[in-house]
Image (cartoon, rainbow, N blue to C red):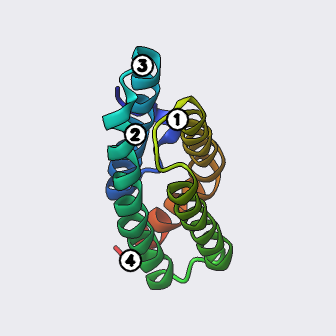
Amino acid sequence: MDIEKKYNTGVVWQDFQHRQLMDLFFKVKEAKAKKTGDDVFKYSLAFLAMYVNHHFKLEEEYMEIYYFPDTDLHKKEHKDLIKKIKSFRKNYAEHDEQSINKLLITLNDWILNHILENDKKLGEYIISCEQKAK
């Protein structure tokens, strides 16, 4: 499933990585519906651990390069999600209805609250800085 335009920030690498997260969300949702979620659940937890480290590091590098004014808030949200994922992995190590529902809620909240708000602001800021540099 392709990411909807409303989720795009306009920054190619950021949109690509967000698309990966959205794809994961839809895979988990589909696996839940088909009741084939055990392997998808394990993959999702591993993917999220890798994703947050790589994606957040890259975003934070751009925040530092361009002196993004909301860097502290943005980094705090990143740290909060990392804590949630660590806690989630500890508390929901096995796939069951409750764990997959909690994973879907966590991903959905992140997509709606962070990507649609703060990442869009960051994307606009990065684009404006890069256009000024030309």
Q: Which residue is under mark 4? A: 133
Q: CA distance from mark 4 to mark 1?
A: 45 Å
Q: Which residue is under mark 1? A: 100
Q: Nearer the viewer, residue 80 or 33?
A: 33
Give the mark nearer the N terminus: 3 vs 1: 3
What kind of residue is marked 2? Phe
Q: Which residue is under mark 2? A: 41
Say which element carries label 4.
Answer: loop
- Tell me what residue is drawn at x 38 percent, y 77 percent: 133
Mark 4 Cα shell of 10 Å, populated few (<14), some (14-19), many (≥20): few
Give the mark nearer the N terminus: 1 vs 2: 2
Q: Is residue 79 above or below residue 84?
A: below
- Tell me what residue is drawn at x 49 percent, y 59 percent: 123
Apparent side of residue 69 relative to residue 95 in the rendered image (left or right): right
Image location of residue 106, percent across then percent down? 60, 45
Q: Which residue is under mark 3? A: 35
What kind of residue is marked 4? Ala
What kind of residue is marked 1? Ile
Say which element carries label 2.
Answer: helix
- Tell me what residue is drawn at x 40 percent, y 61 percent: 49
Q: CA distance from mark 1 to mark 2?
A: 7 Å
Q: CA distance from mark 3 to mark 2?
A: 11 Å
Mark 1 Cα shell of 10 Å, populated few (<14), some (14-19), many (≥20): many
Give the mark nearer the N terminus: 3 vs 2: 3
Image location of residue 23, percent across then percent down? 37, 36
Q: Nearer the viewer, mark 3 or mark 4?
A: 3
